[in-house]
Image (cartoon, rainbow, N blue to C red):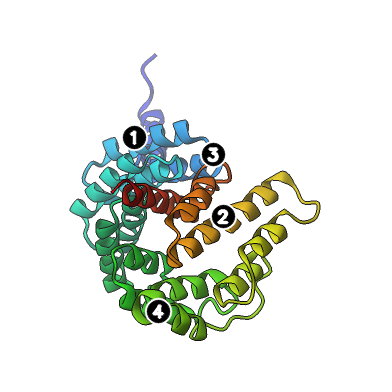
Amino acid sequence: MIPSRASRFALALLLAGLLPALARCESAADYRQQALAALMKKETTKALALAGKAIAADPKDARGYLVRGTIHEASHKHTEAVADFSKCLELDPRIAIAYNRRGAEQFKLGHVKESLADFDRFLELEPKAAPSHWMRGISLYYVGRFDDGRKQFKAGDQVFANDVENAVWHFLCNVHVVGIDKARAAILKIGKDTRVPMMEVYDLYRGKAKPADVLTAAEAGEVPAELRKEQLFYAHLYLGLYYDATGDKQKALKHMALAEGKYRIGHYMGDVAHVHAELLRKELKK
């Protein structure tokens, strides 16, 4: 039956109302949102597929590559993440977070100079983030810019007043500038870091505790297995860094190998342990 003019008009109105909604469902923005939602649920395969659809829907939109790079980052696919963040920045060099994310992924690959260049570019676009950018400070340490590194962690003192790690990394940089005795005397003052065994780590670096005290604290009490692993990770990481700073490369590698292996955690500091262990292995082969 041929529809009447009135019914054809009603159908046209209906389609006019539906088509924008259908277009929105198939838009790059919608796919990006769905991809991020899937990532939040740890459905990485689904998230990657949706990110791919976002890119296919609008290949010139940098945000699709930013989202896919973030998914690769969460999946520990560092090379793929760097490639996507690079494409994102090629399309839109004003997306500051892409520099920061690419910098972190470059560091994880052992490309420390490249990581520092990205962190610096990020801070050019987001200068207010400078005091809290501890990742930049760590990269400065590994490229041998120790004076700049201690300045970075000194600036971080206003943000991380109760964080032993900020004080320790300031010390590690400062050792190379003023020597170990003066670095101990100038160690940043902190409040109470509630993480075990961080206060023992702090006392070790300022000369008020022994390495055994750090391990004893990390192994004490009844705690869940995952928490115990984290405690032992930080114990071995900072024992490794301590022995390196005091000139015992063999002991440094022994502890760093445990931090990067048996006790490794998913945090960025787990990648720091790996990078440092690799550097120690190269030094000890010489």
The amino acid type found where label 1 is placed reads Lys
Viewer-proximal residue among 201 and 21: 201
Based on the displayed image, in which of its 4 quarters is residue 25 positioned?
top left
Q: Do the residues labelled 2 and 3 touch (CB within 8 Å)?
A: no
Viewer-proximal residue among 248 and 90: 248
The amino acid type found where label 2 is placed reads His
Name the residue tied to disc 1. 53
Name the residue tied to disc 2. 236
Based on the displayed image, in which of its 4 quarters is residue 163 positioned?
bottom right
Q: Which of marks 1 and 3 is nearer the N terminus?
A: 3
Q: Find residue 13 and report its horizontal and vertical position in percent.
A: 39, 38
Q: Which of marks 2 and 1 is nearer the N terminus?
A: 1
Q: Find residue 267 and report its horizontal and vertical position in percent.
A: 51, 52
> Which mark lies nearer to you, 2 or 4?
4
Q: Is mark 1 on a helix, strand or loop?
A: helix
Q: Do the residues labelled 4 and 3 touch (CB within 8 Å)?
A: no
Q: Find residue 67 and report its horizontal and vertical position in percent.
A: 37, 47
Q: Are marks 1 and 4 in contact (CB under 8 Å)?
A: no
Q: Earlier in the sequence, mark 4 or mark 3?
A: 3
Question: Up-down: is 269 above or below 28?
Answer: below
Q: Find residue 191 and report its horizontal and vertical position in percent.
A: 64, 80
